[in-house]
């Protein structure tokens, strides 16, 4: 079969091939074979996993961290994150904290630091706090969670 360029924006099916023609593409087109069942199942699995991750982002989560306070002192903390706030808690059996929670709207930036397992949160009032994760693998999860939840707040 000879495929000729066209200006349609939809695929046409001819036998075992799909001919994709692009709007305003001049002579651009490509032939793609039919999707295999394994490919379709793989795509569905990826979509299910993505959906689960998005649901988990909106659930309250706690992370064991070591926070560096304004005086440079390292403090063990539990960093809790819900869809609206960051929660600052002492580990079980300890006393209270000065500031229990901050709105995610007060977060201006969150980013990874050079040392493995560390990240910083900068707030709109100009202050910044550094954190080190007890479980170093959680850094990306924390950064992603805060970033996604902030973008949802500001929509």
Image (cartoon, rainbow, N blue to C red):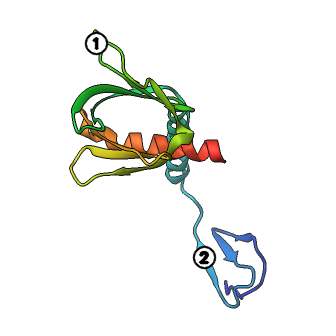
**Precedes in sequence: disc 2 or disc 1:** 2
Q: Position of residue 36 (x, y in %)?
A: 54, 56
Q: Is residue 76 left or right of residue 103?
A: left
Q: Name which residue lies at 53% across and 41% down.
A: 106
- Residue 22 horizontal side relative to residue 30, left or right: right
Does residue 1 lie above or below 87 as drawn?
A: below
Q: Secondary structure at mark 1?
A: loop
The residue identified by callout 1 is 94
The answer to whether residue 73 is left or right of residue 34 is left
Q: Which quarter of the picture shows residue 21? A: bottom right
> Can you identify the residue that label 2 sits on?
31
Q: Residue 26 location in percent, x, y? A: 70, 90
Gap between marks 2 and 1 measured at Cα: 65 Å
Please tell me which residue lies in front, 147 or 44.
147
Q: Nearer the viewer, residue 87 or 35?
A: 87
- Tell me the crowding category of disc 2: few under 14, some 14 to 19, or many 20 or more residues within 10 angstroms, Cα based: some
| Residue 107 located left or right of residue 114 | right
Which part of the image, by quadrant, shows the N terminus?
Answer: bottom right
Label 1 Cα neighbours within 10 Å, binned few <14 / some 14-19 / many ≥20: few
In front of the other: 105 or 141: 105
Outermost residue on the right side: it is 8
Residue drawn where x is 24% and y is 28% of the image: 75
């Amino acid at each position: 079969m000879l495929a000729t360029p066209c200006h349609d924006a939809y695929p046409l099916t001819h036998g075992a091939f799909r001919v994709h023609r692009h709007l305003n593409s001049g002579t651009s087109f490509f032939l793609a074979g039919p999707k295999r069942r394994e490919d379709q199942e793989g795509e569905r699995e990826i979509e299910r996993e993505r959906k689960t991750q998005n649901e988990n982002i909106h659930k309250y989560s706690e992370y064991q961290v070591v926070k560096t306070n304004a005086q440079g002192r390292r403090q063990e903390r539990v960093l809790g994150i819900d869809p609206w706030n960051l929660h600052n808690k002492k580990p079980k059996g300890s006393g209270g904290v000065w500031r229990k929670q901050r709105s995610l709207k007060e977060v201006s930036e969150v980013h990874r630091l050079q040392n493995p397992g560390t990240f910083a949160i900068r707030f709109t009032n100009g202050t910044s706090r550094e954190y080190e994760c007890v479980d170093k693998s959680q850094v990306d999860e924390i950064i992603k969670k805060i970033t996604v939840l902030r973008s949802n707040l500001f929509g």
